[in-house]
Amino acid sequence: MSHNNEGHCGSCAHFGDGIPSEQLVQIRINSQDSGVVGGCDHPENSSHHLMVSPISSCDRYTPAEAA
């Protein structure tokens, strides 16, 4: 199992569109790639309807607020 770290989508404020909030909290708390994919709602990416895993990353990373 892979772990998401700071800089990965699983800990980014833009990650999680389409993932139930309880599951998203668990991804952020446990820092594990659970095999789910979620949308990226960064304004520059939202029109592309990107689906990414918790261990994906990009240059637009913004840390999520603490759970």
Image: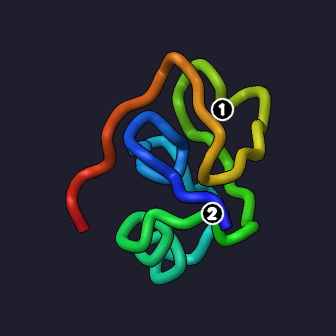
Q: Tell me which amino acid carries mark 1.
A: Ser
In the displayed structure, would residue 39 be above or below residue 43?
A: below
- As helix, strand or loop, the secondary structure at mark 2 comes to loop
Q: Which percent across, then down, holds residue 24?
A: 50, 70
Mark 2 or 1, nearer chain start: 2
In the displayed structure, would residue 7 be above or below residue 15?
A: above
- 10 Å crowding of disc 1: few (<14), some (14-19), many (20+): some
Which residue is pictured at 51% across the width and 40% down the height?
Answer: 8
Give the residue furthest to the bottom: 22
What residue would you read off at disc 2?
Answer: 33
- 10 Å crowding of disc 2: few (<14), some (14-19), many (20+): some
Point out the image quarter for the C terminus. bottom left
Residue sitting nearer the eye, 13 or 32: 32
Point out the image quarter for the N terminus. bottom right
Quarter of image, res 19: bottom right
* Label at residue 46: 1
Q: Which percent across, then down, holds residue 63?
A: 31, 40
Which residue is pictured at 72% across the width and 45% down the height?
Answer: 52
Residue sitting nearer the eye, 10 or 32: 32
Quarter of image, res 30: bottom left
Direction from residue 30 to residue 53 in the image, left or right: right
Q: CA distance from mark 2 to mark 1?
A: 22 Å
Q: Which percent across, then down, holds residue 54?
A: 60, 53
Q: Which percent across, then down, holds residue 6?
A: 38, 41
In the displayed structure, would residue 53 be above or below residue 23?
A: above
